[in-house]
Amino acid sequence: MTQAEKTVVSPRVERGLDIADRGFPLVWLCLYVLLPTSGWASVMFASWHDQELFLETLRSVLANGRAEAIDDNVVGPAYMALAALVHWVFGLGPQDALVALNRASYALSVASALVLVRVLVRRLASAPPLGSLAAQLVLVGLVVGAGTWHWSDVPWSHFVATFLAVLLYAARFAPARVSIASAALTGAVLALLVLTRSFEAVALVAAWGVTLGLVTLLRLSRPRIPRLAHLVSGAAAFLVAAVAVQLITGKRGLFFLYGGNIDEGGNLLPTESAETPTFSLAFVPTKLVQLFYEPCYDAMCSLSDYVGGSGAPSGPLAEAAGNERLWRLPLAVQLPSLALLPVCLVVVGGLVVWFVRNRAKASGRVRELRLLLEMTIAATGIVLGYVASTISGSPHLRYGLARDFLLPALLTSVVVAGLLGAGLWLALSRIGPVRIPPTSIRLSTETVLVGLAFVLSVGIVAGTAVARAQGLPRIESRKLGPVEYRATCRGNVCDIDVVAETVSGRPISIPERSTLTFGCGSDTPRLTVYTENPSAGVRVAPSCSAPRLVAAWPTVMGLPPGSYELGFVDVANARP
């Protein structure tokens, strides 16, 4: 028995600590109410496409019981149904209802994450309440350091989806065992998530299945047939939630976000859109660098530079709100926990190996291992899914692309805080009380753990603040300056050379895959095509006589969010 295990605590103190541990999510909610938010919502309702669309859709649902954007699978029906409920219950206008739903979703998603951290540390490491409190402090440090709370008043469906996803984990893993109530809550929340953001729902269900298969294959857990009562209650709650959403929004048929056409998004004219691959796996390593570390890596600094970019704002009102420079920052600064996702993969993988080698010792903790595995796999899948999407690139950062990574960032934060809290408790409990030299003062294991957690949380907040102000070391050799496409057209075939330079004027080779817009005998855009090798010749439709290249875009930077970005790439047409 370790010295830490011999520590005697009075029952009254123990009950008080347990109440503080369980009630810490309420402390977070009080803290969030005191934190200042951006005030950008009213600005963006008047100037940004997404917020204008959400407001218009909600108004249509409230007035007509349906909306075209929902029927076209552009806006999740459950998102609008929840906003309508906020409107009816609290008597708020459509705009205020969307903001209130967003803020509540963000605050409650973190509160649910704190519950998961407590579950992990208390059950995985058999830690006392102070050990769990220390881990929850670390999570709050990661959340406050990210700064997402500042713009949590800007309505996006990602905030609601993040809350529903984390609540789904809490419904499944927080109770000591599955009950009819927890099964029903799981079914209802899953239905709402599927009808809010289908991609995130698919990622979570896939991680659920992969983890279940893995622990079964490794014989860490025997396959269990769910009780009929649990299946019936879960399925019934799923159907009730789905029907309720249908009744409120008028949605008919299945919902799949964007209807599989996410690669056609953006504020582009039809003549500036092309049928492109949904995923570009070859660009994943490049985009990981672009999005998480150096936005100018193989991308034009005039659009992506978060320090001295010369690009005009995405709208005067948005720039006045102050979000332009903040959102240009690399995701490693905006959502620092995601930088630790590779570490989580290694540590959780090591835990799986330890569980396999020590089945007898670990038999009572497989459920917690499953929680860690599911969250890590889901976070990794969502990150890779968005990074591999052809549409994603570092120019999208200026449009708030960080919102797509909110869920994996929070899941990673839970894994980091849970592993750190459990690991530190196990390590410190072996050391026992710590004496402060040269005095005879001895600090208990719990006190040392809480002190370390507090220092770590303050360090996270301070470190991210410095990184936000100073930026990260730059990769100067790959920062793009001007990019030009030179076309020579003969008949309906155009040979196109891509000429790029770094910001220092040095020629540089970039991947040629591009979207190209042509005019037919003039500079008026008529059609856009996607090509992997433009220098080998691009065949234009025979109906387009005398084709001329009028716009181009290298897809290594994703697809252009709008016509504004296309103006930063020069084109030239040579006489054949």
Image: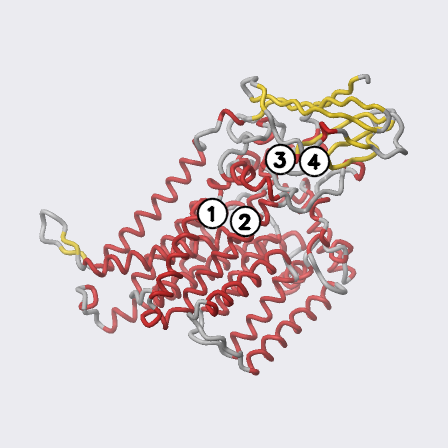
Whole-angstrom CA distance, mark 1 to mark 3, is 21 Å
| Amino acid under disc 4 | Glu
Q: Residues within 10 Å of mark 4 (few under 14, many from 20)?
A: some
- Single out the mark in the foreground, 4 or 1: 4
Q: Earlier in the sequence, mark 1 or mark 3?
A: 1
Q: Which residue is rendered at x = 45% and y = 64% of the image?
A: 371
Whole-angstrom CA distance, mark 2 to mark 1, is 9 Å
Q: Position of residue 407 (x, y in %)?
A: 53, 53
| Amino acid under disc 1 | Leu
Whole-angstrom CA distance, mark 4 to mark 1, is 31 Å
* 403 sits left or right of 253 in the view: left
| Amino acid under disc 2 | Val
Which of these two is toward me, 181 or 365?
A: 365
- Single out the mark in the foreground, 4 or 3: 4
Please determine whether, in this image, residue 157 is positioned above or below residue 356. Answer: above
Q: How is the image coloured?
A: secondary structure
Q: Earlier in the sequence, mark 3 or mark 2?
A: 2
Residue linked to disc 1: 338
Q: Which residue is rendered at x = 31% and y = 67% of the image?
A: 126
Q: Position of residue 54 (x, y in %)?
A: 69, 51
Which of the numbered marks, if any, corresponds to residue 277? Answer: none
Kindly state the secondary structure of the residue where label 1 is placed.
helix
Residue linked to disc 4: 532
| Amino acid under disc 3 | Met
Residue linked to disc 3: 557
Q: Which residue is rendered at x = 67% and y = 38% of the image?
A: 559
Q: Residues within 10 Å of mark 3 (few under 14, many from 20)?
A: many
- Single out the mark in the foreground, 1 or 3: 3
Residue linked to disc 2: 383
Q: Residues within 10 Å of mark 2 (few under 14, many from 20)?
A: many
